[in-house]
Structure formats: C-alpha cells, structure tokens
Image (cartoon, grey):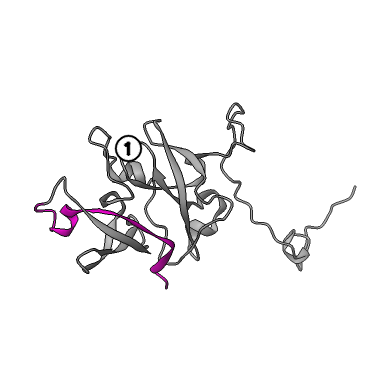
Amino acid sequence: MKMNASIPQHLYGYVRREILQGLESGVGETERCVIFGVTSIPSRALHFSIMCESGAQFARIPLHMLLWDTPEDTATRHDLHDLQSWDCHGWDFSVCQYEFLREMGCEYRQPDGTMVPAAYWFTLDHTDNGFSQYPPEHKCYHFLLLEDGSGQIAAQPNNRIRWRDDSFTDHSLPIDYRTMAPVTWHAEVGRRNPQETAFTKDAVSVG
C-alpha cells in the first residue's frame, strides 16, 4: 500500500490559515508553505503534505486549502468539488511529471460548464484497484495551476481538460469523443479470443 508519495516537483505556495487553526479562525488569511507530498485515501479527496515557514509540517491538507499564488481580491474562490471532480479510487498510485506537458497551458471545464485557464504541474494515476483497471472508469488526475486570479490548484481527469500547444493544437476542431470501451488489450495470442482456446466448443449441426 502506497498512500503517500513525493510530488515530482515541489511547489512554493500558500496554505489557508483556517485549516491550520482547526477551522476556528484565520479565515481569509494565508501563510507561505512548500507543497511537497500527496496522499490518497479511498473515497476521499486528495490531500497534501506541506512545510510552513515557521518550520511546522502538516499532512493531509485538502486541495482547496492550498494556493500556488496570491489570490486577487476580486477572484472567485473555487469550492473543492470544482477543483477535484472525483474522490480517490484507492490507496496505491503513481506520480510523474510528463515532460511533454510540463508548464503547458490548458483550460478545464467545471461542472457548471465554466472554462478555467491553467498550466500543467504534474500527474497522479491510481493503480491496482477495480475502478482504475476497468477502462471506462479509469481517471488520472492532472494537477493544474489556475490562471484565473484565484491562485488555486485543480486536479482534473483527461476528459475535462483542453490543452493548448500553439505549434500543434487547433481549437477550431470539435471534441466529439466517447468514453473508453470496456475492452482490455493483450499482445499474447492466448488472450485474444477465449472461445477459440477453450477445451470444448459448440458443435455445429448439419442437415
């Protein structure tokens, strides 16, 4: 069981002080921190490990309590369900920072249809659980640094993000794709067609 992992590229950001004060005070205040670890607990939101400038270290800080930049006064503060669409699928996961996507611009679609501009940070993908092993249910989490003035961080699956690469992508083209089919692919011919390799086969009637 993994549960915890280092983030591929730690981030100097901010934490909302209310989470450090037991949600009893500190609303509207922030404190500088380093975001360096991520935690996955099934059926809960993703959580993070941070180090504060005071030297205090906290674990299991939820995503909506973290910032990568100081928020603008007039910016919208996004709720947790707008930043992360799905709870964690399991304890085990892998993390990586795709070189091709590194710092690439994009926009993601919130549940109400609003498009939010952002930039790529890193990716988390759950492993070894029934949801992630079933193609239609698999969802990875791309962590995005929002560029709408909120200073917040989102974790979004592939089907809620539209990437922006000026040398390749063309946003005039439609996005009309479907969910992955419930099919798994195998190179070994013994897995290709179970009926063909069965010990018994249906008899063919003649006449």
Residue 116, relative to residue 189: is it above or below?
above
Instruction: Give x and y (percent) for residue 16.
Output: 21, 52
Q: Nearer the viewer, residue 160 or 91?
A: 160
Name the residue at the top extreme. 172
Q: Assess disc 1: are there few (<14), some (14-19) or many (≥20) residues with their C-alpha within 10 Å of its C-alpha.
A: some
Which region of the structure is painted magenta?
Answer: 1-25
Residue 16 within the segment the image draws in magenta: yes
Q: Residue at x 76, y 66 (%)?
A: 190
Q: Nearer the viewer, residue 159 or 20?
A: 20
* Residue type at numbered disc 1: Gly
Quadrant into which the N terminus falls: bottom left
Instruction: Give x and y (percent) for residue 93.
Output: 46, 64
Q: Which residue is mark 1?
A: 149
Residue 3 within the segment the image draws in magenta: yes
Instruction: Give x and y (percent) for residue 186.
Output: 70, 61
Q: Residue at x 24, y 63 (%)?
A: 52
Instruction: Give x and y (percent) for residue 112.
Output: 36, 31
Residue 191, relative to residue 135: is it above or below?
below
- Relative to 94, 197 lies left or right: right
Q: Quadrant for residue 170, please give it.
A: top right
- Relative to 57, 28 lies left or right: left
Q: Residue at x 35, y 44 (%)?
A: 83
- Relative to 42, 125 lies left or right: right
Q: Residue at x 22, y 35 (%)?
A: 73
Residue 82, relative to residue 129: is it above or below?
above
The kind of secondary structure element at disc 1 is loop
Name the residue at the left extreme. 24
